[in-house]
């Protein structure tokens, strides 16, 4: 009996040692692969930091030039037609913008290097002539292009390539907005609705912080407004915050609806894409110059400061929304995030002045709430609030981000987002679809109901 026990124990120890050896070899292999992706993520982030600094410097230069020479708004039709022609004849799939970055991240489709040059030049041109656009779209496309080409050069494939692409997205957000925490989660969250890809967490964190650090070290200035005071979390203030979050979600939904409607309208009215681009550019020029709306051109960063001072109204938010929809809808390049900041801050500042007697707190909630609902990134929204305004209003950030996210439904600035976890039980059939396909299915169902 003791001999059998000894032999059994010996065999168990032998098997355990063999298992530990196999685990050690597997862990060593995974560590080597992870280290390789981590180092490449740092390379992508450093390159994106330089690209982000150059892009933001170009935007500051052309913005100052436009504000000194308002006649540049008259060139909107020229830039609109040129952008449409360049993307149609030389852009390949680049006209899909951030949706191409999402597709490339999830499917492994490579992004041609020309996308970076196109988005840099055409986005800068849009801001030169006053198109109401942002900077995140161009930044993410730059980061995605850099990451895709680095992956191709170093033969990174499969899941490692996906992680590297997400790190590129994170580095782009961190470099463009100076918000490294939000940037880290944006890379993990941008491609999906209802999912955070934690497997890329280390690379996204490193990418966002390094991209931000390089951009700042090269001289990119970032400044954020401050919240004068955070109201106590009582029943009344909580009710006001929840009602405001509903409005922020509805505003985000209206924003995406308007962009989609403008694109469909131009496609329906014009068979010639250059005619559509010219008409859209002329319309924008008339609105900016004849109606004196030039303040709402470009980034319109004045809106945020005005909202925190309590000098904005819902009319300001709606004007910025309409002009951004007309700009993006006609195909002019840039992005949507900075306009969303202005729209949300303007609406929130007005709500704060009316309901609380102090605008800055609600302006901050509106700024992040409309952004997060339109892009379907609630966790990124919370981190953005912490990056911009500190953690003292963190409870409100959580409440507003998730309520506005749910209210916005399956609508998105990025139609290529994959719906992993539907937002509501009534939308469960949208699981595993893209936002674009889900919206098309809803439209067909509505048409069938109308016919019956």
Image (cartoon, rainbow, N blue to C red):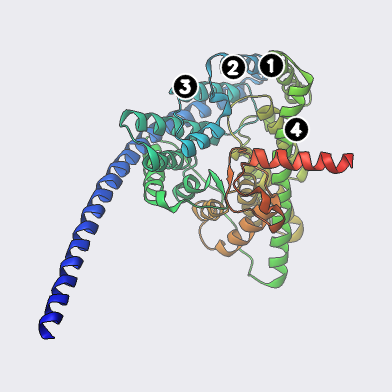
- The residue at the point 52 percent across, 28 percent down is 59
**Vertical placement of 230 versus 342: above or below?**
below
Residue occupying image coordinates x 10% and y 82%:
3
Along the line of sight, the residue nearer the viewer: 135 or 252 = 252
Q: Secondary structure at mark 2?
A: helix
Contact check, label 2 and label 1, Cβ < 8 Å: yes
Q: Earlier in the sequence, mark 4 or mark 2?
A: 2
Label annotation for residue 273? 1
- The picture places residue 384, in percent across and down from the top left corner, at 53, 51
Q: What whole-number distance in Å separates the C-alpha atoms at marks 2 and 1?
A: 9 Å
Question: Image check: 441 left or right of 39?
Answer: right
Q: Which residue is mark 3?
A: 117
Q: Earlier in the sequence, mark 2 or mark 3?
A: 2
What residue lies at 52% left-to-right and 35% top-to-bottom?
Answer: 103
Task: Give the quarter of the figure containing the C terminus.
Answer: top right
The residue closer to the viewer here, 304 or 387, is 387
Q: Which one is earlier in the sequence, the residue at label 3 or at label 1?
A: 3
- The circle on residue 88 is 2
Residue 121 placed where, x, y %? Answer: 51, 21
């Amino acid at each position: 009996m003791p001999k059998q026990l000894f032999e059994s124990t010996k065999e168990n120890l032998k098997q355990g040692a063999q298992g530990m050896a196999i685990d050690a070899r597997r862990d060593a292999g995974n560590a080597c692969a992870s280290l390789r992706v981590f180092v490449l993520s740092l390379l992508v982030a450093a390159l994106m930091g330089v690209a982000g600094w150059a892009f933001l410097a170009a935007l500051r230069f052309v913005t100052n030039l436009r504000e000194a020479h308002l006649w540049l708004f008259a060139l909107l039709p020229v830039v609109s037609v040129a952008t449409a022609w360049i993307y149609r004849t030389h852009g390949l799939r680049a006209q899909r913008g951030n949706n191409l970055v999402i597709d490339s991240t999830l499917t492994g489709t490579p992004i041609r290097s020309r996308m970076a040059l196109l988005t840099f030049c055409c986005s800068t041109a849009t801001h030169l002539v006053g198109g109401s656009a942002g900077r995140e779209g161009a930044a993410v496309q730059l980061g995605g292009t850099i990451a895709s080409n680095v992956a191709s050069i170093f033969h990174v494939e499969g899941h490692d390539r996906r992680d590297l692409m997400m790190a590129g997205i994170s580095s782009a957000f961190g470099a463009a907005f100076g918000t490294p925490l939000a940037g880290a989660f944006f890379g993990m969250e941008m491609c999906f609705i209802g999912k955070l890809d934690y497997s890329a967490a280390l690379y996204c964190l490193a990418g966002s912080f390094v991209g931000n650090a390089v951009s700042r070290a090269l001289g990119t200035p970032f400044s954020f407004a401050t919240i004068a005071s955070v109201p106590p979390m009582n029943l009344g203030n909580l009710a006001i915050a929840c009602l405001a979050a509903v409005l922020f979600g509805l505003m985000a939904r209206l924003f995406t609806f308007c962009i989609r409607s403008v694109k469909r309208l131009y496609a329906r009215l014009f068979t010639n894409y250059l005619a559509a681009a010219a008409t859209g550019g002329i319309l924008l020029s008339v609105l900016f110059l004849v109606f004196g709306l030039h303040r709402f051109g470009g980034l319109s960063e004045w809106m945020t400061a005005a909202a925190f001072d309590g000098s904005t109204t819902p009319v300001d938010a709606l004007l910025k929304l309409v002009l951004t929809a007309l700009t993006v809808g006609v195909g002019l390049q840039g992005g949507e995030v900075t306009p969303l900041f202005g729209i949300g801050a303007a609406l929130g500042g007005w709500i704060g002045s009316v309901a609380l007697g102090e605008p800055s707190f609600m302006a901050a909630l509106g700024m992040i709430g409309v952004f997060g609902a339109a892009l379907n990134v609630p966790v990124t929204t919370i981190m953005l609030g912490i990056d911009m305004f500190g953690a003292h209003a963190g409870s409100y950030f959580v409440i507003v981000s998730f309520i506005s996210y749910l209210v916005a439904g399956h609508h998105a600035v990025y139609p290529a987002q994959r719906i992993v976890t539907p937002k509501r039980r009534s939308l469960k059939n949208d699981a595993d679809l893209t936002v674009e396909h889900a919206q098309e299915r809803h439209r067909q169902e509505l048409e069938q109901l109308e016919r019956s």
